[in-house]
Amino acid sequence: MSTALAPPIDWQTTWAALWRPHRQALRAARHLDPIRLDQLLHVDRQKAALCANTERFLAGQPANNALLWGARGTGKSSLIKALLNAYAPQGLRLVEIDKEDLFHLPEIIDEIYDAPYRFIFFCDDLSFEAGERSYKALKSILEGSIELPPENVLVYATSNRRHLMPESMRDNQASELVEGELHYADAIEEKISLSDRFGLWLSFYPASQAEYLAMVDSYFPHETHERDELHRAALQFAQSKGGVRSGRTAKQFFNAWGRRH
């Protein structure tokens, strides 16, 4: 089967596309998430850093690949989607690709190399298990091989793991302290070398109770008379989700309770 991108994407009218491995082609995204930057609460530090990096990228200035890592449901993916909605009118475009399809990246990049747009390749929930080797393809994309990475491409990835790979006690046992300097074991060095290729690291943490309730309130702006009852229900809902307080949990609570209010 041909690896040509057919039918070609009209990037003037298409803001985002998804790689479809069975068709060996990109498909234009039909319905984009309308999330806006101002809807993302309590991630101001991460938002400011990623926006600044993206603005430098759009201006043709040096910018970094970005790794957004941390607790699940804390807004990592939503932040990247909101960036697209904010900056697409300035020429930003998004290509979403799964971890299993990263080896297709060189062919996709060849197709957009000369396009007059700036592309973010979005890898959501990126991580690699012990023994996997597909991460090696990502390394060459992040820093290039004999050919430098194209100036109009960056990689933004989200992950629950800071180093993208599992760490074990066995890895640490071979590390040693030499003249006051820590020398990591080869296994750890290899794992860190992948995440190190992302010049911008942004960490995300679970919300406090007050932050979680503020997220809930943002979904119920007109609810005034039963706010205490709403908060009690929202906390009970979070408890039923294993005590996870996050933006995702707040939205799921709204989906479950919105009609009642």
Image: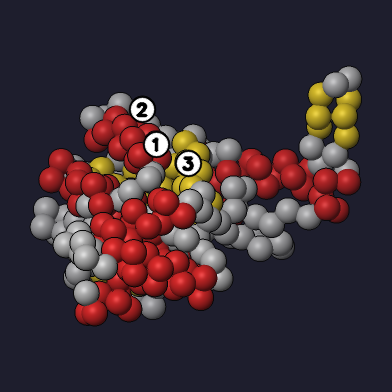
Residue nearest the observer in this picture, 197 or 82: 82
Which is nearer the N-term, disc 1 or disc 3? 1
Residue at (73% x, 53% y) in the render: 167
Classify the position of the C terminus by image quarter: bottom left
Q: Pinpoint residue 93: horizontal percent, then vertical percent.
A: 24, 50
Distance from disc 2 to disc 3, alpha carbons, whole Å, reads 18 Å
Residue at (30% x, 26% y) in the render: 61
Give the amino acid type for the residue marked by disc 1 in the picture: Arg
Give the amino acid type for the residue marked by disc 2 in the picture: Pro
Return the mark for residue 45. Answer: 1
Q: Residues within 10 Å of mark 2 (few under 14, many from 20)?
A: few
- Closer to the eye: label 1 or 3: 1
In the picture provided, is 179 more to the left or to the right than 85? right
Q: In the picture, residue 95 is in which quadrant? A: bottom left
Residue at numbered disc 2 = 62
Residue nearest the observer in this picture, 147 or 242: 242
Q: Residue furthest top?
A: 179
In the picture provided, is 174 more to the left or to the right than 107? right
Residue at numbered disc 3 = 202
Residue at (19% x, 46% y) in the render: 86
Question: According to the image, what is the colour scheme of the structure?
Answer: secondary structure
Q: Are marks 2 and 3 in contact (CB under 8 Å)?
A: no
Q: Pinpoint residue 55: horizontal percent, then vertical percent.
A: 26, 33
Residue at (26% x, 57% y) in the render: 218
